[in-house]
Amino acid sequence: MKILITGATGQLGTELCHLLDEKQIKYIGVGSKDLDITDKMAVDDYFSKVQPELVYHCAAFTAVDDAEEEPGKTTNWDVNATGTENIANASEESGATLVYISTDYVFDGTNDNMYNENSETNPQNEYGRAKLAGEKAVANIMNKYYIIRTSWVFGKYGKNFVYTMLNLAKTHDHLTVVDDQMGRPTWSRTLAEFMLYATDKKISYGLYQLSNEGSCTWYEFAKEILKDTKVTVAPVTSAEYPQKAYRPRHSLMNLKKAKNTNYQVITWKDALVEFTRQIDL
C-alpha cells in the first residue's frame, strides 16, 4: 500500500514516521516545503503523480493564539480548513483512505460531562472553528475516512507543554499554572499508534476520539511533570493568565468508541513516564 504522510516534519507527523520506520513500513512523508496543501492545483498534481492509497493528514496550523488574528483570513484557515479540503478532494479522487486529526477545541467546554462523538460542537476560538471546518470537509467529501479528535498533545519531536515546563524549571524555582481548565493529555506516540491501528485493523470508518486515559487540569499536569524537581507549582485562574484564544474549561472526550475497537489506551501518567524516559532531561 502506498502511504502518504502530510505534516511529516511536525510533532505528530515525525512520531508517525518513526513508528512506521520501526515497523519497516514504507511511506512518503512531505512537509510544507515539499507540498503546499493550501494550493489546490499543487495538491491535485502531486496526488496524480503519487497516487497514494492511504493518507495520514498530520499537517496543521496549531498556534492557537496566533489563529485569533484576522479571523477567517489567517494561515489557520488556509491550512486547517482549505488545506484539509484540498487533501480530502485529492484523496477521494485517488480512491485513498484518509486519516484526519482534529481537536477537542471543536467543543465549547461548558459540558460538565464527557463529550461523545455525536455531542454538539460549538468551537469558541478560530483554531477550533477551522478544525471543525476540516472535519466537515472530510466527512462531506470522503467515503473512506477516519477523523480522530485529540487533545493536549505532547511528544518528543515538537514544542509542547511538557517541554515548556521542563525548560522553565531550569531557570525558575516557582511557577504558576491555570487550574480551571480540565482535559486529557495525549502522548503523540499513543495517537500515532492508534492511527496505524485503525487503518491496519480496518476498524469502521468514521469519527473517533483518542487521548490517554485519565484527566487533569494544566496545574495537575504541571505538578506531575515537575514532581521530581525542586520547583514549586501554584494554581491560578484563567483570568489571572489571559490569552488571546479562549480555552475550553472542561473538554473531556469520551474514549469508549476507540477503546471498543480493542485498542489499549494507557493512562496519561504512564505515557508521561514512558515519554520522559526517551528524552534527555
Image (cartoon, helix red, strand yellow):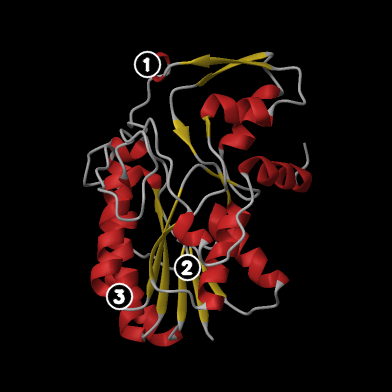
Q: Earlier in the sequence, mark 1 or mark 3?
A: 3
Q: Residue at position x 70%, y 17% from top?
A: 231
Q: Residues within 10 Å of mark 3 (few under 14, many from 20)?
A: many
Return the residue at label 2.
Answer: 34
Near-viewer residue (72 or 275): 275
Q: Position of residue 96 (x, y in %)?
A: 40, 81
Please state which amino acid type lies under the numbered disc 2.
Asp
Q: Residues within 10 Å of mark 2 (few under 14, many from 20)?
A: few
In the displayed structure, 72 sits above or below 45; it is: above
Q: Earlier in the sequence, mark 2 or mark 3?
A: 2
Near-viewer residue (162 or 170): 162
SS class, disc 2: loop
The reply, left or right, for residue 89 in relation to residue 187 is: left
Kindly tell me whether residue 78 is visible in this rendering: no
Q: Quadrant of the C terminus?
A: top right
Q: Earlier in the sequence, mark 2 or mark 1?
A: 2
Return the residue at label 3.
Answer: 142
Front of the two marks 2 and 1? 1
In the displayed structure, 41 sits above or below 17; it is: below
Q: Give the CA separation, mark 2 to mark 3.
A: 24 Å
Q: Residue at position x 21%, y 46% from top?
A: 72
Q: Position of residue 213 (x, y in %)?
A: 57, 46
SS class, disc 3: loop
Q: Position of residue 80 (x, y in %)?
A: 33, 55
Front of the two marks 2 and 3? 3
Please state which amino acid type lies under the numbered disc 1.
Ala
Kindly tell me whether residue 31 is visible in this rendering: yes
Return the residue at label 1.
Answer: 239
Whether label 2 touches label 1, CB < 8 Å: no
SS class, disc 1: helix
